[in-house]
Structure formats: C-alpha cells, structure tokens
Image (cartoon, grey):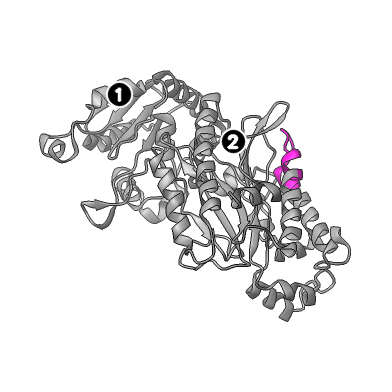
Amino acid sequence: MFSKETYTSRRKILNEKVNSGLILIMGNEDTPMNYRDNTFRFRQDSNFLYYLGLDIHHQAAIIDVDENKTILFGDDLSVDYIVWMGAQPTMRELANKTGAEETQPYKNIETYLNQAKSKNQEIHFLPPYRTENMLKLEEWLGIKVKDLPNQYSKKLVNAVIEQRSIKTQEEIVQMEDALTITKEMHVATMKAAKAGKKEFDLTGIAQGIAVGCGGDLAYPIILTVNGQTLHNHYHGNTLQNGQLILGDFGAENAMHYAGDITRTFPVDKTFTQKQKEIYEIVLNVENTAIQSLKAGVQYKTIHLQAGRNIAEGLKSLGLMKGDLDEAVAAGAHALFFPHGLGHMIGLDVHDMEDLGENLVGYREGLERSTQFGLRSLRLGKELEVGNVVTVEPGIYFIPELIDQWKSENKFNEFINYEKVNTYRDFGGIRIEDNCLIKKDGYQVLGPPIPKTIAEVENERNQ
C-alpha cells in the first residue's frame, strides 16, 4: 500500500468532484475456478485499490460525501478461517491503514444504502463487470441486473477517469518497477528461444519471472509464431527456423501496476532480409510516434500519421501503391495495421476499460470511428501531462483477411495483392513501449529492452 495520506487525499479529491450523496466502491470476491474452495487468483478491483489500497476480498466502502467520512465494510475473520488462512488484520487495523473513519460488518451495507434512499440521497456506483457484484447491486439497490448498464453514475465515472488518468510520481515509480520485471521476462524469452521448443516453454519462463518477482501477469501472455493473430493466447506451436516470435506480455507488480511491452524476434539467431525490411518499417513508425507525443496533441492524429508512415514503408516494398493520403483516409492500410496505436495503462493494462472505453479514450465532440482498423483505436483524445500510454504499431499479414479483401476487389487501387500474396506465411511484427506524457514532451518508462535489429540479434546470440 501507499501511505494512508495518499488514499485520504484521493478520496478528498473524489468527494469534491462528486459533491453530494454516497459513493459506493465495491471490492471483488474470491471466484471459484471449478468448485467453491478452489479459486482463481484473487485480483482486487482497481478502483478499490486506487481509493482504499486494500487487497483483500469481501470488502466494500461507502464514501459519504455529505458526512465527509469513509465507512469500510467487511468482517473480522473467525478462528475457523484463520486455521486455514492464518492470522489477518482486523477491520479496524485495515481502516487505520487506509484512513477510513468507520468500520461496519459487510451485511450492514444494505441498511446504510436504504437509509440513504429514505433521505433521497443520491447513490453513486461504478458499472460492475463481475456477476457477483451485479447481483449484490440488484439486491441492495433494487435495480435489475439487465438495467445496471444504464443506471451507474455518469458523474462518478467521469470523476474517476479524470483523476486516475493523471499518474502521480509514486504511481510512476510502481510502473517503472513493473517494467523492470517485464524487461527480465522479455530478455529471458529471447535468450531461451530456439527451433524445436514449444511456445509454452517460453511462456512458462516469462510467467515464472513475473510471479517470482512478487507479482503476476498483467494480462494473459501473447507469445506466438502466428503474430498475425493479434490476441493469440494459444501456446502449443513448435518453433521452427525461419519463423518470427511475437511476444506481447508484461508484469503486474506487487502493487498491481501493469507493464505492457511487445517485442518481435526471429527463431533463428538473425533476421532474414525480408524480416528486416518489415521490422525496420515498424521500428521507424514506433520511434516517430513516440517522438510525436506531446500534451495537447490528439492521439488519433498520431495514430493516423503512424498509418501513413506504415503505408509509405509498404509502398517502398511494392505492397501498397497509389495516393497514400487517399489510401489511409479510406482505411486501405488497415489490411496490414488493423488495430489502434495504443491505450492508457496504469492499474489496468487497458486502464479503466471497465468504466467504458469511449469515456476513457474519447470526449464529447470527438467520436470513435466506425472504420475498420481506426475503430479499434482505444485512445483518440488529446494527451495530458501525467497520462501514461502505450505506443504499439505493427504490420501483419493475415491470410484470411487478404483473401476476403482480394475476392471483394477491395482497394485494388492501393494494394498490390500479387506482391502481398508472397508474404502470406510471414506472420506479424509489433513493437511496443510505455510512455509518460510530461510538460516538456515524453519519457519512455522502464529500462531499455532490446529493440533495434542489432540489439535483438545480439541478445539472441548470447
């Protein structure tokens, strides 16, 4: 946990933004994997972590804005529980750590909320994403589960997004820590890869480092020779000479802050000439995009420029043709770059996505595009000092998409399908870093992770 003062300060800021009523912040529960006592790894709700810091299941808090106090709801554990799980802090001890003025048994939440309703106090809650919390809200507030998506507090959501989007220095320290672990994960997989191994051999190395450093994975590992599949979580392929390995993974450190890094490297000790040509395009696009990061600049603008630079690189290889400005405006380049350039990152790898992607990444007057490729851009609005974002361009050759577009004669004026067909078995390349927006530009967070062709090949040959 951070200091008590961090959490009381955060709640004070939230109180001022919401201004009146009650704010209900729900923690998560242990979730059964295949029977009640065999649970998935517990992961606390990120908003509960942000405002309370307590990493314990079966807790909730009410921030009573009108009374200017925080009530922590939970139960002291019985000896029967302690026999199995060991001694745990009391609710009073936990309240002292987070600066809550009061504690009550968990069952009292409904009574507290009912009293508020009888006084016509507004009850603010965030959109739930776990079924158990949906059912609790239905019971406590009388709102049917199917109606919850329309009943959450827009005012609270906007206040949380505004606050959590700006990372403090103590948060940056934690993100640097997560990225230090993430570097170890990537370098270890680069060194261990060779023909004949399975993808899961490398996946196990990466996950072991994350757990061994006191945390876990920030998200399921993407580590595959089929890099053209953007979120490929299958790890059963055997590595073969001539293939590329795309590794997109990061650590969640002990304080639950995320790292999100992608590197692509050859199964062989060196890249082929064909691989080098595509790799250099992606690397140049990533470096240019990072250098464009600046407070006040729309991330959508940087994304579109990245698409233009990808198209230019592909045209130099004969894969695209024609007027590139028209090609990018029409979305032709999305055959090769079908995702967004990046997203916010913090306590969540896609930070605050539970509150609504469009609310986090867009604003009134800047609507999300419906165009293929561009519609997958999670962050489009102006960057602010204190934002931390990913920058992750890529080039992919997806046979199924190529065949579909070719059969539809789609963008024949911009795409050289005959040449593209010679890359059908290429796979994909993505390169990604995490960047802090500063008053004077940007900072690439974390220690350097091998990224240039020379650096990657040097790591592969050690």
Residue 52, horizontal then vertical, whole percent = 38, 29
Residue at 76% across / 59% down in the picture? 277
Tell me residue 49's x, y (percent).
41, 34
**Circle 2 sits on which residue?**
447
**Residue highlighted by disc 1:** 95
SS state under label 2 = loop
Label 1, secondary structure: give it. helix
Specify whether 240 is left or right of 87. Answer: right
Along the horizontal axis of the image, is 58 left or right of 183?
A: left
Circle 1 packing at 10 Å, graded few (<14), some (14-19), many (20+), is many
Q: Are marks 1 and 2 in contact (CB under 8 Å)?
A: no
- 397 vs 253, left or right, is right
10 Å crowding of disc 2: few (<14), some (14-19), many (20+): some
> Foreground: 131 or 437?
437
Name the outermost residue toward the bottom. Answer: 407
Alpha carbons under labels 1 and 2: distance apart: 36 Å
Is residue 325 depicted above or below 102 in this figure?
below
- Which stretch appears magenta? 288-302
What amino acid type should be assigned to the residue bearing mark 1? Ala
Farthest residue, direction left: 80
Residue 352 appears at what percent x and percent y? 51, 42
Task: Determine which of the numbered discs, if any, sits on residue 283 in the image.
Answer: none
Q: Give the residue drawn at x 21%, y 54%.
A: 36
Q: Residue furthest front?
A: 462
Q: Is residue 290 magenta?
A: yes
Q: Position of residue 180 (x, y in %)?
A: 52, 36
Image-based side of 226 in relation to 408, left or right: left
Of badges 1 and 2, the one in the foreground is 2
Does residue 293 show up magenta in the picture? yes
- Label whose residue precedes the other's in the sequence (1 or 2): 1
Which amino acid, by three-letter code, is at mark 2? Pro
